Image (tube, rainbow, N blue to C red):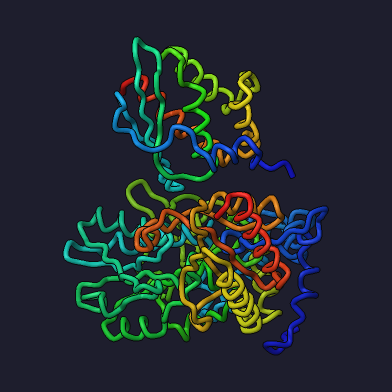
Amino acid sequence: MDSVYKTVLLDHFHNPRNKGDLDNMDRVRRGSNPRCGDEIEVGIRAENEVLESVRFRGRGCSICLASASIMSECTKGLTMPQARQLIQQVLEWFGDTESGAPSNTTLAALGAVRQHPARKKCVLLAWMALDETLANK
Amino acid sequence: MLAPPGNVDFDAIRKDFPILSRGPQALHYLDSAASSQKPLCVIDAIAECYRSQYGPVHRGLYPLAEAASEAYEKARQTLARFINAASADEIVFTRSATEAINLVASGWAGQALEARDQIWVSQMEHHSNYLPWQRVCRDRGASLKVIPLDCNGQLDLDSADGLFGDNTRLIAITQVSNVLGNINPLEKIISLASHNSIPVLVDAAQSAGHMPVDVQALNCDFLVFSAHKMCGPGGIGLLYGKKERLAQTEPLLLGGGMVDQVQSEASLWSDIPARFEAGSPNLAGALGFAVAADYIQGIGRQAIEKWERELAATAFEALSEIGGMTLYGSENSEYRGGILSFNIDGIHPHDIAQIAGEQGVAIRAGHHCCQPLMQHLNISSTARASFSFYNNKEDIAALVMAIHETKKILGG
């Protein structure tokens, strides 16, 4: 059986990057999935449209938390339009299309979850919250 | 075929279920509360129906159609015997237990409920025995009242002020909780309710295939369950209703097969139960349902109940010995059917279920369509192992291994 619990995901679950305090963030948005009780808050701090910091806090399953951690790492340093483009790529990757696998190897680790459609929402929760943060909705 | 309780070879019974030996990986199916597996006799009955018996029910005059109608009504009689209904006319086939509850909510409560009236449910109800009452109460300006639970998840009847009072029009309650496994004291509730002529609807989805259910002994007014949770096919369930209660009920669905005379202004419904079965009846479903009932009856529900309780008690003990576990529901196996919900500190139930799945152990994770109960327990979800008579102690050993594996991977 091809487990989703691979080294990269487990590393981000056990040692989450950029998790915790959101006090110094410019903007914070919350994403929640009431069906499983997952709740993630995502915050950003930007200077001249460049993401200096992407952080999160909350509760969720290992996939949800690992995905948030990977996201925070992969989007830091991007311009806001670049970050939104990456989010779009991840959404499409987990959508119905076969295209759009990311070249970033850390991000590619999330691909193991694609064969478990019931867990897609877990992966995408933080990404959608970040998208809302960037759109300033 | 009837075997005395406690004298059934449950290991041999596993051979009746082809899916349990499909390989290559062993299947430890501990999700029967969601939907049970099917024995060969049910699979064959459905195939045989389509192969050699299939025709329209109550619609044709040629021999094939007449035989189909007769077989369908015979299935109704089998199900009536299964729950000891006084008459087969008190059995209405529906698509599901859910539809059966909706039929009573719209067709019975929706007709008579007034503003000061109350409908009572419990805090452990499945959404299907909660939402229909919530809506009908809202629509009629009545109140939905909830029987609270104590810290063991047992009904706290003493705190349910007015439960048996003059304003209560119906009590709708489950026989066995689909999360906690708790068996509710229905005899006591129905006896107290009947003193004040309060009708009671019993959700028997988790009990009908697992313990003796006798509607006349229970003296309930309505009772619902589905076939697929008791070894039968999907897409069919039933509503039992006392004759006088069904007579007070308006049909939920209107259409073919439920009407005697249609005129431009008004129409005349068919007799009960046909008036509640609009649309072409599900012949294969009804036949499969009846074969499942006979199969379970043949094993004996007392023996099934005893074995499933033993499995649940064994699992409860085995899981209690693992560190960092929270087990929900009653510790006393007298009050527990074959359902066991649990959590592991620091690990999300979805992760438990997924890792268990990779080990061939099928368990459920989530809120189990019981958000009011989750609110009472102050959690968002649990992992749940549920047992059927085709499970054995190896399934429990596999569950324990899967929990250890989960803890190893995710460090709980």
Q: Is residue B66 visible?
A: no
Residue located at (55% from left, 72% from top)? B320
Q: Position of residue B50 (x, y in %)?
A: 74, 54
Q: Position of residue A51 (x, y in %)?
A: 40, 18
Which residue is outermost to the top? A48
As drawn, B373 above or below A113: below
Corner quadrant of residue B250: bottom left
Looking at the picture, tell me which residue is in the foreground, A87 or A28: A28
Q: Position of residue B269 (x, y in %)?
A: 42, 59
Q: Is residue B203 visible?
A: yes
Looking at the picture, tell me which residue is in the foreground, B319 or A92: B319
Looking at the picture, tell me which residue is in the foreground, B359 or B266: B359
Q: Quadrant of the C terminus of chain B?
A: bottom right
Residue located at (29% from left, 81% from top)? B197
Residue located at (46% from left, 61% from top)? B100
Q: Position of residue A99 (x, y in %)?
A: 64, 19
Q: Answer left or right for B16 relative to B86.
A: right
Which residue is outermost to the right? B24
